[in-house]
Amino acid sequence: MAKAKSVQQLIKQLQPLFNKWIRLRDFGKPCISCGEYNDKMDAGHFYAKSGYSGLRFDEDNTHAECQRCNRFDESHLISYSENLKEKIGEKDFKALKERAQDYKINGRKWSRAELRDLIEMYKSKIKLMEDENI
């Protein structure tokens, strides 16, 4: 019997699937930060994965962002914030902010079962999206 994957291994498996889903979901849309169209987009997180790992797979927290903004522009979060409020709406933006505050206070532990479910969900979402675009 194969050894069960650790939480970290499952996160490592899930992250590229989640990122691909974000890029597919936002395909053809401009960068959330600068508004420019680009064919090389990242899945940019408003609340960074490094400081808010509990929001790393939150679809409201993650949007197509050009590599220049995501990787090199230290002030990109100013325009990201403004554009994010417009994209998801004030109510969902406020809810995202509350989830971020809750994470900072209470933390978040991913379970293996939850991560396996997310892996399967994003595989299905990607397949559906790719099948629709054939």
Image (spheres, helix red, strand yellow):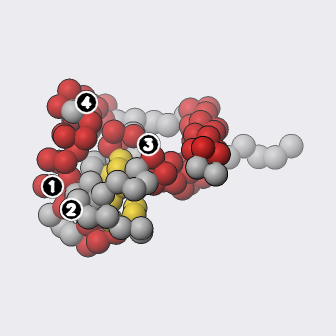
Between disc 3 and disc 1, the foreground one is: 1
Q: Residues within 10 Å of mark 2 (few under 14, many from 20)?
A: some
Pointer 1 with pointer 2, Cβ within 8 A: yes
Res 98 visible = no
Of residues 5 and 16, the one drawn nearer to the viewer in this rendering: 16
Residue hosting label 3: 57
The quadrant in which residue 58 appears is: top left
Residue 47 x, y percent position in the rendering: 28, 48
Figure disc tally = 4
Q: What is the CA distance from the residue labelled 3 to the residue labelled 4? A: 16 Å
Q: Is residue 39 left or right of residue 102?
A: right
Q: Residues within 10 Å of mark 4 (few under 14, many from 20)?
A: some
Secondary structure type for disc 1: helix
Residue hosting label 1: 79
Secondary structure type for disc 4: helix
Residue hosting label 2: 34
Whichever of callouts 3 and 2 sits on the residue coming sooner in the sequence is 2
Q: Amino acid at mark 1?
A: Ser
Q: What is the CA distance from the residue labelled 1 to the residue labelled 2? A: 7 Å
Q: Amino acid at mark 3?
A: Phe
Secondary structure type for disc 3: loop
Residue located at (21% from left, 69% from top):
73
Whichever of callouts 4 and 1 sits on the residue coming sooner in the sequence is 1
Whichever of callouts 4 and 2 sits on the residue coming sooner in the sequence is 2
Q: Tell me the tag on residue 92.
A: 4
Q: What is the CA distance from the residue labelled 4 to the residue labelled 1? A: 17 Å
Res 13 visible = yes
Q: Amino acid at mark 4?
A: Asp
Q: Residues within 10 Å of mark 3 (few under 14, many from 20)?
A: some
Residue 92 x, y percent position in the rendering: 25, 30
Whichever of callouts 3 and 4 sits on the residue coming sooner in the sequence is 3
